[in-house]
Each structure stands twice: as structure tokens, then as C-alpha cells.
Image: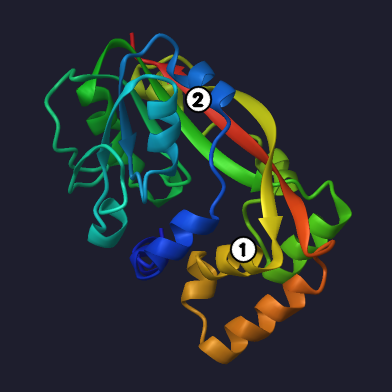
Amino acid sequence: MDARRALSFGSAAAQYDAARPSYPPDAVRWAVGDATRVLDLGAGTGKLTRVVLDLGLDAVAVEPDDAMRALIPAESHDGTAEAIPLADESVDAVVVGQAFHWFNPTRAIPEMLRVLRPGGRIGLFWNLYDDGVDWVASLCDLCEAEARVTLAKEAGTPPFDGSAWGTSEPEVRQVPHEQPMNRELLATQLRSTSKFILMAEPAREALVARVLAVAPGDEFVLPHVCQVWRATKP
């Protein structure tokens, strides 16, 4: 894990919240099953928390960055995946949006299982650019984007081994969805990513300009695929 990238987002918390895509409600419901109390772990600004709340569920969030945590619209705690500040068996599901790859799994997975009740669910979400669309493929190429559908399909392996941790084997769904977009919002989205945040400003803005040149107009939709994995604690 690149700690510098993992801890870079707070400096762009408002941009992150305004420009990052949400998560499809159907994908969240599939992941959490019949849960009523859901932990959003590594919650950022609460993009996934909001979907949990919109489904009528009770949400609690854990996020280490003060600037991001301030935007979460639910009960929230300062903490990390490796040291979750919740009681044993206190939630029915643990969901992680766009953050599991920043965790230390050998410490985080036992913590996730500790706070989960028996029969509880782990749901891991990644929004991927749908680079089956030509202009999105050009965007990904220019940005050297890691979160793109073709790369995820090439990897194709579960995020963790269920048998090693005593859970069911993770199963996956790919859920297409679209984000309403315009050129200004796309620029904001790019500037909210860890790679762009850490670039020197002249290089960053030059790259933003090159990406905007491939956008299909002033108002458009940005196609994503939400890759969601779920596993169950016995």
C-alpha cells in the first residue's frame, strides 16, 4: 500500500464528495442482505453511507480523516480498518467503498469479523470506469487509470480467500450505472483522485485539459460498472 496516496484525500474532501460517483442501491442491497445495522468502513465522505441510509438501514461510519469524516451524514467515529472502534458483534454488515485496497488485510479482516454478528455480511465495492466505451477508454489511457473494467476482468480474483478467514468464498456481481456529468465536474473528479492530488499543479492541470478534450460534450453521462464482492460470516 502506498501510504502517501492512501492519506491524500482529505486535502480534497469537498471535491471528492461533489464529484465521485455513488453506488447502485441494488448492489448495496445484494451485498448486505437482510442487515439492519451497517458499518461503512473507510467511509470517506459518506458516499456509500448515504446509500445505506436511503435503503432505510441504520448506518455507522468509521473514517480516519477528519476533513472527510466531517461530511458523513450519520453516526461516525475516528478509526481505521485495522482498529475498528466498535464493540464485538455489533453490526449486521460491514461495507467498504473504494477503500479495501488501502487496508492491511491481515489486520483488517479479523477486525471486520470481530464486529460482525454471526451470519453477517462483508461487502466490498469498487466503481470502475466502463472502458468498453471508446471515449472512456481514452480517458483511462490518458490517466493511466487503475479503476477500469478491463483491468478488473484481467485480475478476476476475489479480494480475499474466504477459506483462510473462515467466511464463505467471496462472490461477485458487476452492476452498470451512469453518473450525470459535465466538463467542470469531470475536472473536479480527476483532481480528487490520489494520483492527481499528488501531482505538481502545472502537470496536473495539463493532464486535466487533455482528458477534457476527449469528453463527448458539455453535458454527458460517465458510465461506470460497480464491482461488488460479498462474503458471509458463519
Q: How is the image coloured?
A: rainbow
Residue 185 numbered mark, or none = 1
Residue 162 in percent (x, y) is at: 43, 22
Expressed as whole percent of the image width and height from the top left, the position of residue 88 reads 14, 22
The label on residue 119 is none
Q: Real-space Cα distance between discs 1 and 2?
A: 25 Å
In the picture of the structure, the residue carrying the numbered disc 2 is 28
Q: Is residue 66 left or right of residue 175?
A: left
Q: Residue at x 33, y 35 (%)?
A: 40
Check whether the beta carbons of the residues at disc 1 and disc 2 lie within 8 A of each other.
no
Which label lies toward us, 1 or 2? 1
Nearest to the observer: residue 204 or residue 49? 49
* Residue 178 visible, this orientation: yes
Figure quadrant of residue 122: top left
SS for tag 1? helix
Location of residue 11 (image quadrant): bottom left
Q: Report the amino acid beneath label 1.
A: Leu
Give the amino acid type for the residue marked by disc 2 in the picture.
Val
Give me the residue at 58% from left, 31% from top.
Answer: 24
Q: Nearer the viewer, residue 78 or 166?
A: 78
Quadrant for the C terminus, please.
top left
- Earlier sequence position, callout 1 versus callout 2: 2
Residue visible at 75% across and 49% down?
221
- Residue 203 higher or lower than 156, as above or below: below
Residue 7 vs 39, above or below: the answer is below
In the picture, the quarter occupied by the N terminus is bottom left
Image coords of residue 59 (percent x, y): 29, 28
Label 1 Cα neighbours within 10 Å, binned few <14 / some 14-19 / many ≥20: some
> Does dot 2 land on a helix, a strand or a loop?
helix
